Image: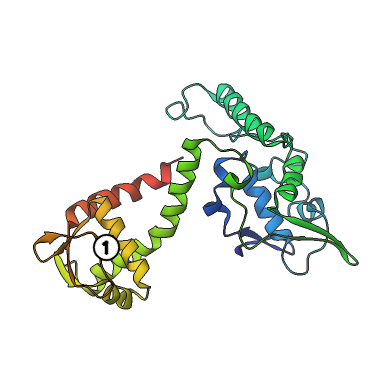
Amino acid sequence: MIDDLCVPGPRWDMAMHNDWWAAGWEHVLPRQGFPLTMLIGTASQSGFTGSLDDLLQEIFGGDWDMIGGSLDGALSFSWPDEEWDYTEAPEGREAYEASRWEDFGALLTAAGFPVPTTVRDLSELYLTWGLARREKTPTGTRWSMPGALPLPGDLLPLGADLTHRLDQIRWTLRTGPLVDGFITHLVDDLGEPQEVLTSLDRLAAATGRGADDARIAVSELVQAGDALVYRGQEPADVERLDTHQRFRLVMNWDHLHATRVALMRAEPTAG
């Protein structure tokens, strides 16, 4: 699926594939991967026919700063006009770029793919990888994207560290809304109780989720140190509980508020 970002152009609204963040390509590709995906997502809207150059001309007059000007703009891993953060990357922009290009080039070469240098080169790799499709029709060129994007690890030999990082990102995107919905239930519906006698099926019914989702939410709270689970007076493993089994959920609200507020405050400056 493609999410409409509601950024109006002369004719088309910009659209972004909603699987982009979960797939993790932004952690692998040069920075132009994001706007290129947005451009292809926009071209995939019903009714548009033409090249990406045509769409770029129609919406931005052929020059979009976010993508580096045109499709023939050079790829990079940093924004050239941004103030460099020497705390995050003390080696400086040039050394950072060189290191990222070395890793990126080695990754693609090992997989037998050419190393792109322009946005247009990268768009051709999108077609090779199956991130996008381009078809000639009687009315003109039609673009489309699959419902679920291929994962970087399915196409490229990612190292163990990056593979773990992307797995963690996907898991957080999967579990984050479940945990948030569960906390909302505890706060808004139950008034932040110190302890709740409940079961997974009851929590599922109260939050409008399935029992497996309730199990995930409780497990995440326990792993984060925000809650404990007991059967009687003995600690219980939520992964081993039947959905109908009663258990005591003991909340550590001080820890939950302190850590989650800290994380939310850190988000705007992260990355």
Q: Residue at x 64, y 60 (%)?
A: 15
Query: Is residue 92 placed above or below 201 in the rendered structure?
Result: above
On the question of residue 70 being in view, the answer is no
Residue 31 point in image, percent of width and height: 61, 40
Instruction: Indicate the amino acid at tag 1.
Output: Arg
Q: Which image quarter is the N terminus in? A: bottom right
Q: For this view, does 39 lie left or right of residue 81? A: right
Residue at the disc numbered 1: 240
Residue 210 point in image, percent of width and height: 38, 73
Query: Is residue 24 placed above or below 42 in the rendered structure?
Result: above
- As rendered, which of 142 and 63 lies closer to the eye? 142
Number of numbered discs visible in the structure rendering: 1
Q: For this view, does 188 lie left or right of residue 141? A: left
Q: Residue furthest right?
A: 138
Q: Residue at x 18, y 68 (%)?
A: 247
Q: For this view, does 242 lie left or right of residue 141? A: left
Residue 271 point in image, percent of width and height: 46, 40
Residue 105 point in image, percent of width and height: 66, 30
